[in-house]
Image (tube, rainbow, N blue to C red):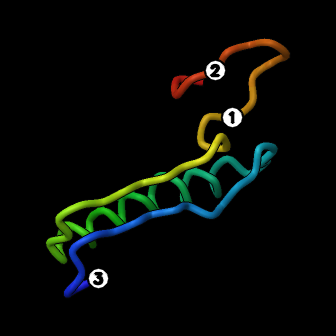
Amino acid sequence: MHGCNYLFYVTAHYSLWQKDRDLLYRHKVEGTHNLLAAAEKARISRTVYTSSVAAIGVGKSAQVVDETH
């Protein structure tokens, strides 16, 4: 990232029915943490982060879900 001003992070691990929650956590949370730490070290001035519905999960029929789900 050295020499770059911007970071566009478009996460790619997509699974609504992930049975291995630890794997999803490592990719989504720890991976994002590592990437943002590297961006900070490289002095990236702006980051655009795009996630997916898989980060929230699927609720029961007609149930509205948010980040706390």
Q: Residue at x 55, y 61 (%)?
A: 11
Image spot of residue 31 (x, y percent): 46, 63
Q: Are marks 3 and 1 in contact (CB under 8 Å)?
A: no
The residues bearing labels 1 and 2 have C-alpha atoms spaced at a distance of 8 Å
Q: Residue at x 75, y 51 (%)?
A: 15
Image spot of residue 35 (x, y percent): 36, 67
Image spot of residue 38 (x, y percent): 27, 72
User: Compared to 53, does 40 lie above or below?
Assistant: below
Q: Residue at x 18, y 77 (%)?
A: 42
Image spot of residue 8 (x, y percent): 40, 66
Q: Residue at x 29, y 82 (%)?
A: 1
Q: Which residue is mark 2?
A: 65
Q: Which residue is mark 1?
A: 57
The residue sitting at the bottom extreme is 3
- Of residues 20 and 9, the one nearer the viewer is 9
Q: Secondary structure at mark 2?
A: loop
User: Compared to 64, does 48 lie above or below?
Assistant: below
- Of residues 15 and 50, the one nearer the viewer is 50
Q: Are marks 1 and 2 in contact (CB under 8 Å)?
A: yes
Q: Which residue is mark 3?
A: 1
Q: Which label lies toward us, 3 or 1?
A: 3
The residues bearing labels 3 and 1 have C-alpha atoms spaced at a distance of 31 Å
Label 1 packing within 10 angstroms: few (<14), some (14-19), many (20+): some
Question: Does label 1 or label 2 sit earlier along the sequence?
Answer: 1
Question: Does label 3 or label 1 sit earlier along the sequence?
Answer: 3
- Of residues 44 and 57, the one nearer the viewer is 44
